[in-house]
Amino acid sequence: MTQSGKANFITSKGLLEDPSSAFNSKLVMATVRSHDQYNTTIYGMDDRYRGYSVNEMWSL
């Protein structure tokens, strides 16, 4: 746990900028996305990449 009780995020200029400390009790998170790679991206109901807007209401 951190002193603040919250997650601390550190940004770097590139992936594994400092390889010697990359996996020393740190969680390394990275997201990568390219255009037209729809299988690995979560889209909202208004999707500017696929060109549609959906306004639906579901009720159970």
Image: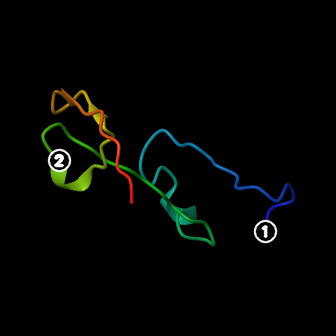
Question: Relative to 51, is 36 above or below?
Answer: below
Q: Residue at x 48, y 49 (%)?
A: 17
Residue topped by disc 2: 38
Image quadrant holding the C terminus, namely bottom left
- Quarter of the picture containing the N terminus is bottom right
Label 1 Cα neighbours within 10 Å, binned few <14 / some 14-19 / many ≥20 = few
Where's residue 9, x and y in %?
64, 49
Against 25, is 34 above or below?
above
Residue 4 in the image: state x and y as whole percent: 85, 54
Residue 6 occupies which quadrant of the picture? bottom right
Looking at this view, is 15 or 43 the one in front?
43
Between the residue at mark 2 and the residue at mark 1, the CA separation in whole angstroms equals 35 Å
Q: Nearer the viewer, residue 47 or 29?
A: 47
Query: Is 3 left, or right, of 22 in this rendering?
Result: right
Inspect the image, locate mark 1, and give the three-letter code of the amino acid beneath it. Answer: Met
In the displayed structure image, the side of residue 5 where residue 46 appears, left or right:
left
The residue beneath circle 1 is 1
Report the amino acid beneath label 2: Tyr
Query: In the structure shown, which secondary structural element does the residue marked by tag 2 occupy?
Result: helix
Q: Secondary structure at mark 1?
A: loop
Q: Please state which of residues 43 and 31 is positioned toward the viewer in this rendering.
A: 43
Q: Residue at x 87, y 59 (%)?
A: 3
In the rendered image of this protein, does residue 54 appear above or below residue 4? above
**Residue 46 percent coordinates (x, y):** 30, 31
Quadrant in which residue 14 is drawn: top left
Q: Position of residue 30 (x, y in %)?
A: 42, 53
